[in-house]
């Protein structure tokens, strides 16, 4: 019962951990990282195309150089008149007219020109509090010139705190700034609510507080509430998208002013004397990344095209963080380190790609900081845990392995010790049997048979003991090759002759077809043992009356000896095993044929010591052919 529930409990505990990480992370805003990745996304998404409703004019270096000073009240009056004649729809001056230089008369003339232009306004950075609307009023003689509020929000003490501008303010305490009011004129769905002919006065006078301005935050995408203000993110185009016209070229009339017809014209400064004329943007953190003229253009454009990026609600970000945490925990605990890293790396990459696509195609800003941090936390939390588990496991393996090696060593030592001690008594038995056989007193047939059996059994025993001794030498790596030149054919003949009595006892004919060969260098004892084993096996496993063919030839720099029999063959599933230590086939084990399962193992080992190869080809019921290849060099 407990076993059945275990996997479910494991999953549950992982899910709970993921949920806990999500809940803890949710307490931290990570605004800096979030905004940083947002900026990255903004940079890699295709920029928005301007609607063409906005033109910008700047007092630039050329203007200052040519005039030898800042433009005067007179200069402004001339420029405003030209723009008005050109049919500009709305003119916004980010330069405070009351700060222009000129005589009283000149200032008065500028003021009356400004007042006479419908939808001309001076935009100020101030945000008046309720009841303090007079703060926006310009000093005499400009008191009647419409002044509107156009603050520049900077993430200085709030949000990312990186001094970057990503937002605009649409309203404060319910009073709209110039952005939504002007943008509405260029939106088909809001035209009726748009700023009226003299709306600038309305906005400055704040008669609109009662709703006359027609501003409604629901008309604009992505508006959010922040400290009694309505804000929205600006959909930025890179700096330079709005190419500004030089103030000088209008003043001098060197430019065709018809381009300003029906446009929103924004006038400002670009002379890099104060950072107040500039903002940092998602595209660049340079202190003069973008003029506030271009920022105003971007802000208005965002509202005209209604494309403000919308931040996904917190619960969506939490769900994503939870899923990614859970996935990370599973990966860290189950995948191999390389696969795990690859999986988590590609998850990071894929999720960033998804966040880019949602921003690009849907205009949604989904949280990236929390899921990313969750991956790192889950990873670093579980890696030590996994390391401990794996360390313990490999320690256990190590201990087990050590024990096995010791047992193996003990076994080999014991076997070789025993075999060594057995050799002397066996030799003595064989010697005595020979003495009895060679005795001049004739033996009775029963005695002769007994002596023959004694001799055969002691031969078998000796062979077995020698095998064990060779094995011991192999395992203690004590085998040394004693190389001599020898003709393999001579060895084949020697071994065949030695085994003839065995073959004859089963009425088996051992034929040889030996191609004349050069002698090669080899350890004669070992190769003799190999050949003896193969021919003996052939005789042992073949039925009575069959025949065996031993051939030799030279082929491709190798001496190839083949032993082919007409025996039972070896089942295919056993072929890969017959060269293994102590392996005996099922048939051999079930029969009366004696053997240790060491012969082929030793044969293979000895041939490989000579850099040669042993192989077998066998068909069940038809016979087997063993092949030995020894290099001639
Ligand atoms: P064994 O002492 O059992 O002969 P070997 O290592 O010499 O051990 O051979 C391993 C097994 O391979 C044998 O048990 C036998 O099943 C099989 N085998 C070897 N030679 C032949 C053969 N000529 N014909 C059929 N089976 C053979």
Image (spheres, rainbow, N blue to C red):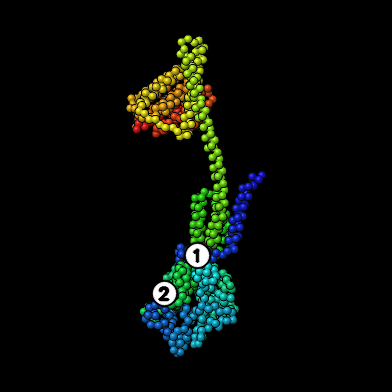
Q: Residue furthest right?
A: 1
In this view of the protein, can residue 324 be seen by the observer?
no
Which circle marks residue 259 in the picture?
none
451 up-or-down from 342: above or below: above
48 up-or-down from 95: above or below: above
583 up-or-down from 26: above or below: above
Q: Front-most of 134 and 499?
A: 499
Q: How crowded is mark 1: few (under 14 residues within 10 Å), some or many (20 or more)?
A: some
Instruction: Determine whether, in the image, residue 271 is placed left or right of residue 362.
Output: left
Name the mark nearer the viewer: 1 or 2.
1
Q: Is mark 1 on a helix, strand or loop?
A: helix
For disc 1, the marked residue is: 36
For disc 2, the marked residue is: 244
Q: How crowded is mark 2: few (under 14 residues within 10 Å), some or many (20 or more)?
A: some
Q: Front-most of 493 and 560?
A: 493
Q: State the residue at coordinates (49%, 17%).
A: 432
Quadrant of image for the N terminus: top right
Quadrant of image for the C terminus: top left
């Amino acid at each position: 019962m407990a076993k059945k529930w275990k996997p479910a409990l494991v999953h549950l505990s992982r899910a709970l951990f993921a949920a806990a990480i999500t809940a803890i992370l949710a307490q931290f805003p990570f605004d800096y990282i979030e905004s940083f990745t947002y900026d990255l996304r903004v940079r890699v998404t295709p920029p928005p195309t301007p609607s063409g409703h906005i033109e910008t004019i700047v007092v630039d270096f050329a203007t200052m150089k040519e005039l030898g000073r800042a433009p005067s009240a007179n200069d402004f009056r001339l420029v405003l008149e030209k723009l008005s004649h050109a049919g500009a729809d709305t003119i916004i001056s980010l330069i405070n007219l009351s700060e222009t230089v000129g005589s009283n008369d000149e200032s008065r003339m500028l003021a009356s020109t400004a007042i006479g232009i419908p939808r001309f306004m001076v935009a100020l950075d101030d945000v008046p509090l309720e009841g303090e609307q007079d703060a926006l009023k310009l000093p005499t003689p400009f008191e009647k010139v419409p002044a509107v509020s156009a603050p520049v929000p900077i993430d200085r003490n709030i949000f990312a705190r990186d001094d970057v501008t990503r937002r605009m303010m649409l309203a404060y305490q319910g009073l709209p700034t110039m952005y939504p009011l002007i943008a509405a004129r260029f939106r088909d769905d809001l035209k009726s609510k748009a700023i009226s002919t003299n709306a600038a006065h309305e906005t400055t006078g704040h008669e609109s507080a009662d709703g006359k301005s027609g501003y409604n935050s629901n008309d604009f995408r992505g508006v959010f509430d922040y400290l009694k203000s309505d804000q929205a993110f600006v959909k930025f185009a890179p700096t330079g998208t709005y190419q500004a016209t030089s103030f000088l070229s209008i003043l001098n009339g060197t430019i065709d002013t018809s381009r300003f017809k029906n446009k929103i014209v924004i006038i400002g400064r670009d002379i890099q004397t104060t950072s107040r004329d500039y903002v940092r943007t998602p595209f660049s953190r340079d202190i003069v990344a973008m003029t506030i003229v271009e920022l105003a253009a971007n802000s208005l454009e965002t509202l005209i095209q209604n494309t403000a990026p919308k931040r996904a609600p917190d619960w969506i970000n939490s769900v994503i963080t939870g899923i990614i945490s859970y996935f990370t925990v599973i990966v860290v605990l189950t995948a191999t380190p390389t696969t795990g890293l690859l999986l988590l790396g590609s998850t990071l990459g894929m999720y960033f790609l998804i966040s880019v696509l949602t921003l690009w195609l849907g205009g949604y800003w989904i949280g990236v900081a929390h899921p990313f941090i969750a991956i790192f936390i889950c990873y670093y939390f579980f890696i030590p845990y996994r390391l401990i588990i794996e360390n313990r496991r490999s320690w256990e393996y190590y201990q087990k392995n050590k024990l096995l090696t010791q047992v193996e060593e003990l076994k080999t030592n014991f076997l070789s010790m025993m075999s060594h001690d057995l050799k002397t008594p066996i030799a003595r038995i064989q010697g005595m049997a020979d003495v009895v056989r060679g005795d001049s007193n004739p033996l009775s047939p029963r005695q002769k048979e007994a002596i023959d059996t004694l001799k055969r059994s002691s031969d078998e025993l000796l062979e077995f003991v020698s095998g064990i001794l060779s094995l011991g030498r192999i395992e203690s790596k004590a085998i040394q090759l004693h190389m001599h030149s020898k003709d393999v054919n001579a060895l084949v003949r020697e071994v065949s002759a030695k085994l003839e009595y065995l073959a004859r006892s089963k009425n088996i004919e051992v034929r040889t077809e030996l191609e004349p060969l050069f002698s090669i260098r080899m350890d004669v004892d070992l190769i003799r043992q190999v050949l003896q084993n193969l021919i003996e096996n052939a005789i042992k496993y073949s039925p009575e009356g069959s025949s065996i063919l031993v051939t030799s030839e030279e082929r491709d720099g190798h001496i190839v000896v083949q032993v082919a029999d007409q025996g039972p063959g070896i089942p295919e599933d056993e072929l890969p095993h017959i060269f293994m230590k102590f392996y005996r086939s099922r048939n051999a084990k079930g029969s009366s044929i004696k053997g240790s399962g060491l012969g082929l193992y030793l044969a293979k080992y000895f041939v490989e010591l000579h850099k040669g190869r042993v192989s077998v080809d066998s068909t069940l019921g038809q016979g087997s052919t063993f092949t030995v290849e020894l290099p001639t060099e």
